[in-house]
Amino acid sequence: MKALAEPVGTGSVVWEQAVADLWEAGRSARLGDDTIEMLAKPRRSVEVAIPVRTTRAGLRTYEGWRVQHSLTRGPGKGGVRLHPAASLEETKALAMRMTWKCALLDVPYGGAKGAIRCDPAELEDVDRERLIRRYANEIAPVIGPERDILAPDLNTSELDMAWIMDTYAVAAGVNGRGAVTGKPVLIGGAAVRGDATGYGVAKCVVASAQQLGLRTPVRAAVAGMGNVGRAAARTLAEEEGFRITGISDVGGARVAPSFDIGAVLASLEAGAGVADLDDGEPIERDELLTSDCDVLIPAATSNVINEANAPRVRARLIVEGANGPVSGEAESILAAAGVEVVPDLIANGGGVVASHLEALAALQFSGEPASAAFDLVGRRLLSTLAETRAQATELDSSLRHAALMLAVGRVAAAHQLRGLYP
Ligand code: NAD
């Protein structure tokens, strides 16, 4: 299960920002206001009550949502999260982000997201299974391989996906493999899925470091050594000859001339925190963001690079492993200082490309060998990055603006082709 990697609970602010970003990108793509207005409305938002007979607290009724922002380019695709501050507005914003990500990466899906408002720490295992299964049963009529495909997100795991798949299978009278990705390998999950996001982040780092002409060996700091951060650090150190000079997690940070990443990962995987390691020198956790390095990879939470610390960032390149780690104000400060930011829409898209492979394998009852899947993730991200870079150069804009503009334009073009019924 994932730790709480992103602050949530600012639903309406997040939604308003997502809509404002859409208007800006839509205008750059020269879309009409009527088209932008249509794209700003989720196609379908389902709100469900989830009554659960809990072991300790008797009957509790939770709220949940599944939002399908767009189904124009393909079935919905997006995770489902558990959080005490989850809301419809936040879910809408996250579903919209999935639409843009799939369009930008040319994954043939729309965008969707699900959430249940609850404190997962308070749930006994048996209550959790009842909660997840009842939620899956309530949304079963609108999900499935042709409708909307779910995946893990904050506080949900591959076991939750197994329960969703099984509940959907019983409700729909089908096998159910194609209704979720991020499920256990034994029931059709893809081995590549776990490391695909971090691997893709690393590929974006390497291509952008070359583009900027950074001197080798390039020094990288990874803020947030979780699933994404670890896979990125491993790929950079073991396959690309980078030096990892800084690492952090929620409990602390360390710097070193060059970490032995194999040893660091072995300790972290055995349960140690970054603060417990012997390697390197301990520093304050957030000092890592302004430490001496060439590349910074924020791979934990949103808005960690903000107005306050952006002027002190020493890296030449930031590649967003997490969703939204660089605030809007920080991005302007960094741009003025000549720091390049590779946005999350591209950089952490390896997960959704790998999910597409998993969903395809489910439909074909076959599988892609892991090495071919990694190659495909790398190629797709790098071609998207090159295309976005060309667009940004033409517009004289940030990569983030160019990425959103391309994505929004693609979804609008698909709408145009399909036409409007009736
Ligand atoms: P994770 O829970 O595995 O890891 C998060 C890590 O960040 C943990 O090591 C935690 O200790 C650390 N952390 C938390 N707060 C921190 C802070 N303030 N400073 C430094 N470290 C901190 O999560 P993950 O799956 O690696 O996801 C990380 C981010 O990437 C999230 O924003 C997530 O939404 C995004 N993302 C993940 C995937 C994926 O495939 N896992 C795909 C796309 C986007």
Image (cartoon, rainbow, N blue to C red):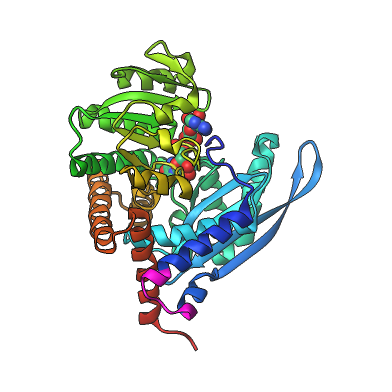
Tell me where residue 107 appears, x and y as whole percent.
Answer: 34, 60
Viewer-closest of 236 and 135:
236
Please give the count of numbered marks on the rendered protein: 0
Q: Considering only vertical position in the picture, is 117 above or below 316? A: below
Residue 272 can be seen, yes or no: no
Chain part drawn in magenta: 26-34
State the image coordinates of residue 404 (x, y, percent, origin top left): 38, 61
Compared with 196, 262 (above or below) is above
Residue in front for this viewpoint, 20 or 333: 333
Q: Where is residue 158 drawn, in percent x and y?
A: 49, 42
Kindly identify the residue that appears in the image at 69 percent across and 41 percent down. 127
Magenta span contains residue 33: yes
Asked if residue 50 lies left or right of residue 162, the reply is right
Residue 135 shows up from this direction: yes
Q: As drawn, is 184 to the left or to the right of 338? A: right
**x then y, percent, for residue 84:** 67, 44
